[in-house]
Image (spheres, rainbow, N blue to C red):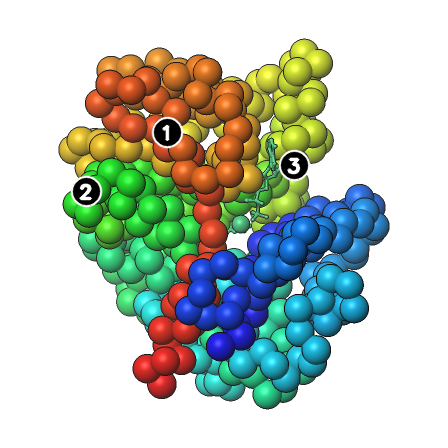
Amino acid sequence: MYILIINAGSSSLKYQLFNMPAPEPLCTGLIERIGTDHSLIRHTVPSRQGNPVFEQNEPIASHARGFEKLVALLSDSRFGVIRHPDEIVAIGHRVVHGGEGFTQATLITPEVKEKIRSYFPLAPLHTINFTCIEIAEMTFPKAQQVAVFDTAFHQTMPEYAFRYAIPEALYRQEGIRVYGFHGTSHKYVSEKAAAWLRKPEAKLISIHLGNGCSITAIQNGRSLDTSMGFSPLAGLVMGTRSGDIDPAVVFHLMANGYSPDEVYTLLNKQSGMAGLTGFSDMRDIKKLRDEGNPAAELASELYAYRVKKYIGAFAAVLNGLDAVLFTGGVGENDSDMRARICRNLDFLGIHLDPDKNKTSGSGLREINPAQAGVKILVVPTNEELEIARQSFALLETD
Ligand SMILES: Nc1ncnc2c1ncn2[C@@H]1O[C@H](COP(=O)(O)OP(=O)(O)O)[C@@H](O)[C@H]1O
Ligand SMILES: CC(=O)OP(=O)(O)O
Ligand SMILES: [Mg+2]
């Protein structure tokens, strides 16, 4: 069964085509830095001899333009893997917000779309998922569409972790609570890690550092707490988002002339690493800090310090720790950032092996000294494969 997976992040569009249940993709693609003048498309065909790669730098203004590119590549004479869009039986979409309404992969109907739309105000950088669903409906009219939600994995959190200390009516009537995000990624990497450790009940801290960043405490395969909250704005410092901030800052800014929209844009799009350094992409910031730029150095310390505080908090939540997992573009690739985060955490049993940390690799790898009590694992995430598995399971039982 050909299933195309669309994973639209805030600044990227990732896709993979699977012939399920085979886990190896027929083709994979990444369009990154969307909305900038130096977007990059990379499309690979691992299923074909020679593993052909199409790579191009060109400005791609929007996710919609990116989608057109990927559709053309899927049936391209050199890099394509299908002859006609109708060969694709289903499209699995990453949908960032599923509220309390969605705890499982769900077949997309007009009612489901309406419900997804009602969550727009909660995850505004990610309304892009909905746009991708609508484009896919037009491009692949015969295919079934499935939504897999970032929030679903976190629906196991205990109420004392997901509620805020505000009047109960705001939870009951307005749905104001912690939802948590990146659940598909946290689920995928924590299952990989538990299998690696041969310990299904493992106590894990999963750290997803991409453009958006979040950290999750997991025990027995269940999310116990996570750093993102009501929206993907809370918690860690991110590419353009502030993460945790005293809400009084919002009132102060509004008392000084900012409109709600302006505060919203400030905290979601102009803050985080972008606010501190002028750059949201960690590769740019890494270059600056290697050149000794003080703003990039401070921002990197602030970023690592925030992660470290959550590691301490979640070690307490778990009352123990088997492994810390690094994933996402930064977590998988930035050894310097991993070292900053793990520095001076030895009282928790967290020791990094500097040589192993610097070695790059493509699969799961251990970067702690051999006898360490707590494993430190780099676990490449594969949200697309997780979405494909959940979509396939849903369609099989349908
Ligand atoms: N080799 C690398 N070194 C440091 N950071 C990297 C590297 N490769 C990717 N990144 C960073 O990863 C982030 C993107 O992560 P990703 O998980 O792909 O994001 P998202 O899915 O949220 O769009 C960017 O900040 C990018 O700079
Ligand atoms: C929820 C979220 O922040 O997603 P991303 O990291 O893909 O932007
Ligand atoms: Mg992502």
- Which structural element holds mark 1? strand
135 and 279: which is toward the camera: 135
Mark 2: amino acid: Lys
- Badge number at residue 366: 1
Residue 298 spot, x, y in % from top left: 57, 18
Cα distance between the residues tagged 2 and 3: 37 Å
- Badge number at residue 199: 2
Q: Residue at x 66, y 31 (%)?
A: 283
Seen in the picture, residue 164 relative to 344 is either above or below; the reply is below
Q: Is residue 285 visible?
A: yes
Q: Quadrant of residue 148?
A: bottom left
- Badge number at residue 280: 3
The tag earlier along the polypeptide, 1 or 3, is 3
Crowding near the residue tagged with mark 2, few <14, some 14–19, many ≥20 C-alpha atoms within 10 Å? few
- Count up the numbered dots: 3
The single residue placed furthest to the front in the displayed view is 49
Seen in the picture, residue 204 relative to 340 is either above or below; the reply is below
Q: Are marks 2 and 3 in contact (CB under 8 Å)?
A: no
Cα distance between the residues tagged 2 and 1: 16 Å
299 and 165: which is toward the camera: 299
Q: For ligand 1, which image quadrant applies?
A: top right
Mark 1: amino acid: Glu
Q: Is mark 3 within 8 Å of ligand 1?
A: yes
Q: Residue at x 37, y 29 (%)?
A: 366
Crowding near the residue tagged with mark 3, few <14, some 14–19, many ≥20 C-alpha atoms within 10 Å? many
Residue 367 spot, x, y in % from top left: 39, 25
